[in-house]
Amino acid sequence: MINILKKWWQSPLTAYYGALLLLIIIAWCARGFLSLALFTIIFIYLGNAAIVGIERHLHLHHLLSTLLVYLLFLGVLVAAFGQIIPPLVSEASGLPHTLNELVRTYPQLESSLTKLVKNLTQNATVISNGKAMLSSGMVKLSRFSSGVETVILAFFFSFIFNLTKAQLQRFVHAFTKSRFAGLFVPMGNLVLKFVHIFGTVIETQLIICTINTILMVLGLWLIGMPSLLILGIMVFFLGLIPVAGVLISMIPLVIIAFVTGGLIRVIEVLVLVVVIHMFESYFLHPRLMANATNLPIFVTFITLIVSEQIFGAWGLIVGVPLVAFFLDVFDVQLKVKSETLPTPTDHA
């Protein structure tokens, strides 16, 4: 019995799944930092890919390549928002004038709105609900500002990580020579495995955002919306945010549509957004994610639905890579011929 337990304890699989369990416990305890961790991984993966590409083609020093990549990214981001914000403010400033024109064109609308506002202000339930909505709005605004802070912090962490990557590699490698190398080595392999799968999913998400942006710009061009380049940039960046990005992008789109084309154009924009969002959710997203992770389309579709219920908006991003990760960990071969990452037996 003792020999069996000793053999089980010394088995590479024991250390492998023990490391997996330890990582799950750590992830659960640090779930409050989920957004920061995921954003940091995304920025590290994309930044490292760009840095490696520049080093390969331009033969620049790692320090110069890192600074070039992050300065270019910041420049593109500032230029994009510099193009988006001024026209949006201009259109929003013209909104009161448009409303006055609408009331002047339809005089009966003013009396109807006045009567409606009077009835609402005299209704205690409406007032109570209005206070609740205002309080909820303030909470969401606070969350939005916290989200911006998280993105900025993750961007800074990724910059430091990629800048000092060689030093971090030596630091991590020291753990593989320590007394508990049997635990740290499989932990490192598991983390690398997840980052590899997660990075593949992020690349796929960028492809989805690009396709969505092209379709949205074509649709906006067909209905006669102005400033297509600016709106396209806005739709692309907001499309990187699961679910919430669609809702946020609708606000400026509806404002510009109402100012430039009235209620008819607003309805056209809403229909366009709904159609493209349904195309993404029920066809494009499951199909491309299935191709990226070798999962069946049906499994991918169910994973997206379930993970969105469990993890919220982030579930649309982490759900599929988590399933692919655990299938890989349990050695479920979805492809006959594929390059696999290190397994526990490689370190026996």
Image (cartoon, rainbow, N blue to C red):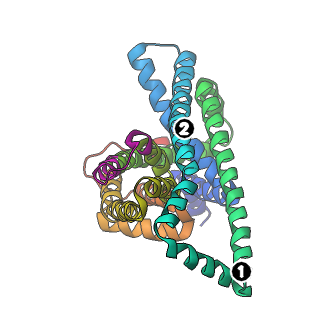
The magenta-colored residue range is 214-231
Q: What amino acid type should be assigned to the residue bearing mark 1? A: Thr
Q: Indicate yes or no whether the magenta region holds residue 48.
A: no
Residue 128 visible in the shown view: yes
Q: Indicate yes or no whether the magenta region holds residue 228.
A: yes
Q: Quadrant of residue 269?
A: bottom left
- At x 65% / y 34%, what residue is drawn? 156
User: Which is more toward the observer, 242 or 238?
Assistant: 238
Q: Which of pointers 1 and 2 indicates the residue nearer the eye?
A: 1
Residue 6 in percent (x, y) is at: 60, 57
Query: Left or right: 136 with respect to 202?
Result: right
Say if 216 sits above or below 185 in the image.
below
Instruction: Indicate the quadrant containing the N terminus: top left, top right, bottom left or bottom right.
Output: bottom right
Cα–Cα span, label 1 and label 2: 38 Å
In the rendering, which numbered label is found on residue 121? 1
Q: What amino acid type should be assigned to the residue bearing mark 2? A: Phe
In the rendering, which numbered label is found on residue 81? 2
Farthest-out residue, left: 336
